[in-house]
Image: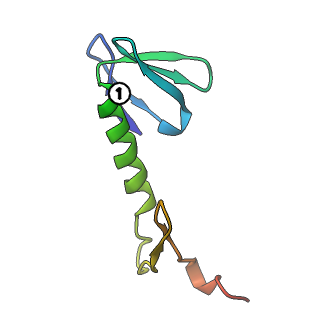
Amino acid sequence: MLKLTRLNHRVVAVNPDHISWVEETPDTTLSLFNGEKLLVRETLDELMEEVVRYRRKVRMVEPEGAPLGPREGDPPRVSWLPGGLRGGR
């Protein structure tokens, strides 16, 4: 979740997967897939940085007790499956 600040200084958490598009006119307006619009104090650039940071954090979490395999691709993906499920039964 992204922690953002509404224009009235209240903090709100937004799931970045629910954001359809964002514009700065001059306030930053988020349009969510459900049709809601949200005005926030963060700039468009700050919001983009937060989304990138969130996505990196979510994708690079190491499963508990298991080492990560090699990171491949763009964005990096980890070739790891629990319990040896990768190559057969």
Most extreme residue toward the left is 9
Question: Which of 56 and 61 lies nearest the eye of the viewer?
Answer: 56
Residue at x 42%, y 40% (from the top left corner): 1
Looking at the image, residue 57 lies above or below residue 84: above
Residue matched to label 1: 44
Please rate how many residues cluster around mark 1, counting C-alpha atoms within 10 Å: few if below 14, some from 14 to 19, many from 20: some
Looking at the image, residue 61 lies above or below residue 65: above
Question: Which color scheme does this rendered protein use?
Answer: rainbow
Residue at x 40%, y 70% (from the top left corner): 62
Q: How many marks?
A: 1
Left/right placement of residue 70 relative to residue 89 reads left
Question: Which of 23 and 62 lies nearest the eye of the viewer?
Answer: 23
Q: Amino acid at mark 1?
A: Leu
Most extreme residue toward the right is 89
| Image coordinates for residue 72, horizontal then vertical, percent | 48, 72
| Image coordinates for residue 86, horizontal then vertical, percent | 64, 83
| Image coordinates for residue 46, horizontal then vertical, percent | 29, 33
| Image coordinates for residue 53, horizontal then vertical, percent | 34, 48
- Determine whether the residue tagged by mark 1 lies in a helix, strand or loop: helix
Question: Which of 51 and 44 lies nearest the eye of the viewer?
Answer: 44
Q: Quadrant of residue 59?
A: bottom left
Q: Quadrant of the C terminus?
A: bottom right
Left/right placement of residue 59 relative to residue 42 reads right
Residue at x 34%, y 40% (from the top left corner): 50
Residue at x 44%, y 20% (from the top left corner): 23
